[in-house]
Amino acid sequence: MRLSIQIGWWALLVALLIACVTPTPPHSLTPTPPPPPPLTPTPITRLYPLPQLASPEYGIQTFLWWHVDNKTGGRDADLVRDLGFGWIKQEIPWAEMMHSRGDQYDWFRSEGVVKLAEERGLKLLARLGAPPGWASAEAPPGLPVAPDDFADFCGALAEHFAGRIAAYEVWNEPNLAREWNGQMPDPAGYVQLLKPCYLAIKQADPNAIIISAGLATTDCGVECASMPDMEFYQRMYEAGAAPYFDMLGAHAPGYMNAPEVSPDETQADEFLQSRVWTFRHVEDVRALMVANGDEDKQIAITEMGWTSDLRPDSPYAWHAVTEAHKAEYLVRAYQYAQANWSPWIGLMSAIYIADPEWTEADEQYWWAITRPTAPGEPADVLPAYTALQRMEK
């Protein structure tokens, strides 16, 4: 009996040693699962009526800011109109409007952006962020800016452009440290910025649509100086975000996958092992909204697309596609959403009409559906532009 017990202990010890030295499969990350949503969602108090867009509506991001006073601004705004899209997404950088505390706002370029959109019958989604150095320097611990300072900017912009800017996206990818003043992402801290910004905009322009920040699609955490998007969304809800946005912002890169590929497939894939590598990861975000009792709201995709950076030395080559596939996939993404996500999908904004200053060294260059050309030169459109232009909308 004693011998058999000793043999049993030795066998257990050997098994444990083998388990400890078994190598992890290449490219294996253990995804951080999102925390389970509450079983009984807290009823959400709606401060203002929820807007509903057609499902979907079509938009694309532009870079008009530095070109409102030259031919490039008009040319690139024309490209959006001629695409048959109804929305321009454009960053309105706080830092370029108020260089020092107490300065008067410089409205020249923001006014130019709004006029370029208005003259072409386009709605404008203004992405808010890009704080001035003085605002970041005076930020409370854990936040990129002081909430009151940011709310002052949100309110001033909405008051100046009441009825002229259709929607505002509050910040960009706050689940990345590089977008959060170099600090680890903090969903509750983001809500501290979102709430006063929402209230300030609504007080000035009750009909404006407030979209929460689109998040970077990732399942990587502290080791990547980021927070998984699903965890960030859930913790936003737990911090009381729901009353303070009209649509939930999401990003939807397709990576190397066709738009119809299910997240179940990439989760089971030996190499990818995660649900985030698909355009349809948006469906996971929608399920989380519903679980939190927020099913009445639409999702606004504020970035979607595929990169074509196939250069051998590119860090993005592993998930890049050809220009032909980019064109095909973008069209199919819009078609899939129209067929399967109505009525809960709202605005779908692709990336990008290229910034004229980009070169091949810029990551964004390879996501664009046009190539950069100098001011005054004709546009250089890629197959994706032509395909989207011809797409039935």
Image (cartoon, rainbow, N blue to C red):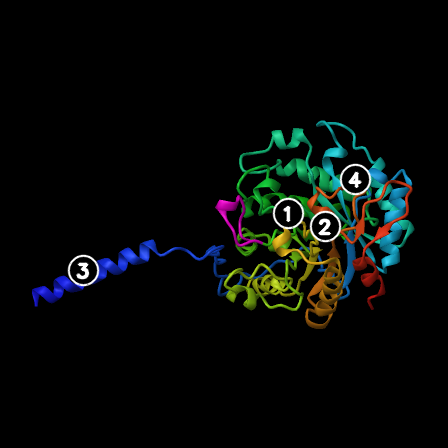
Please report whichever mark, 3 or 1, sits nearer to the chain's N-terminal start: 3
Check residue 221 for magenta coloring: yes
Q: Toward which corner of the image does residue 190 lie, by quadrant?
A: top right
Please report whichever mark, 2 or 4, sits nearer to the chain's N-terminal start: 4
Please report whichever mark, 2 or 1, sits nearer to the chain's N-terminal start: 1
Element class at badge 2: helix
Q: Residues within 10 Å of mark 4 (few under 14, many from 20)?
A: few
> Which residue sits furthest front?
312
Q: Which callout, 4 or 3, points to the residue nearer the camera?
A: 3
Q: In the image shown, does 67 or 37 lie closer to the viewer? A: 67
Q: What's the amino acid at mark 3? A: Trp
Question: Is residue 308 depicted above or below 56 in this figure?
Answer: above
Q: Which callout, 1 or 4, points to the residue nearer the camera?
A: 1
- Residue labelled with disc 2: 366
Image mark for residue 66: none
Element class at badge 3: helix
- Residue labelled with disc 1: 314
- Residue labelled with disc 4: 357
Spatial CA span between label 3 and label 1: 50 Å
Question: Is residue 189 depicted above or below 88 in this figure?
Answer: above
Q: Do residues under tags 2 and 1 come within 8 Å of each other at their CB atoms?
A: yes
Spatial CA span between label 2 and label 1: 11 Å
Chief SS of the magenta region = loop
- Residue 9 seen by the camera: yes
